[in-house]
Image: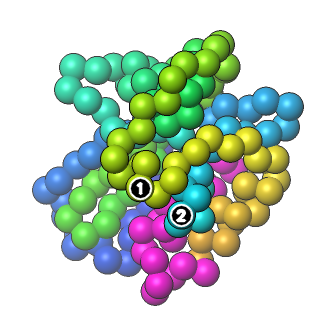
Amino acid sequence: MKTIDIVGENYFGKWDKTRSACRSIIIRENEILLSYEAFTDQWMIPGGGLEDGESVNECCIREVAEETGVQIKVSDCLLEINEYYEDWKWVNKYFMGEVIGTTEMKLTEREKKVGMQPRWLPIEEIKSIFAKHNIYSGKDEMRRGMYLREYTALCELLK
């Protein structure tokens, strides 16, 4: 497994808070399954936070099902991207996923509020969207960092 570090311009130089998340790249006929926030026009690779007592594989499978309604089988963890912003270290573990079924989506209140929905997008189109991460510099640091992370993951895992 490869590890990549991304250090934000606003990083304090040390962290005292950590959050771990698991994400899956799921490909079907040259398209990738994404979570799309309709009201914010924001894309992301599906996944989310690791819960106490949960394995990283279990987290990835659960989060993808909750956000997209797609049940998957996951690979071993192939990539870890550590992000450093302010006093936080964000640990993101990436897997490849294979669709094995469907289930009911279970969105959080925040995800409902932003209109989260599953979308399949051509690989090159989403790479192009994520590649423009720098247009958010100085305007939306969260989106800039997230798009940089997702672009880095796609480039690394889809070589």
- 6 lies left or right of 119: left
Q: Residues within 10 Å of mark 2 (few under 14, many from 20)?
A: few
Q: Residue furthest bottom?
A: 138
Question: Which residues make up the magenta segment?
Answer: 135-159
Q: Which residue corresponds to the image point at 51% horizontal and 53% vertical from the top-left?
A: 115
Image position of 5 with respect to 71: above or below: below
Look at mark 2 in the image and give the residue it sits on.
Answer: 39
Q: Residues within 10 Å of mark 1 (few under 14, many from 20)?
A: few
**Magenta stretch containing residue 154, yes or no?**
yes
Q: Which residue corresponds to the image point at 46% horizontal and 57% vertical from the top-left?
A: 114
Q: Magenta-highlighted stretch: main secondary structure?
A: helix
Q: Residue furthest left?
A: 16
Q: Identify the coloring.
A: rainbow
Mark 1 residue element: helix
Q: Which residue corresponds to the image point at 73% horizontal and 56% vertical from the top-left?
A: 127
Quarter occupied by residue 128:
bottom right
Look at mark 1 in the image and give the residue it sits on.
Answer: 113
How many marks overall?
A: 2
Task: Inspect this view and state whether residue 58 appears.
Answer: yes
- Which three-letter amino acid code belongs to the residue tagged 2? Phe
Image position of 158 with respect to 54: above or below: below
- Which three-letter amino acid code belongs to the residue tagged 1? Lys
Cβ atoms under marks 1 and 2 closer than 8 Å: yes
**Disc number at residue 151?**
none
Front residue of this view, candidates 143 and 70 = 70
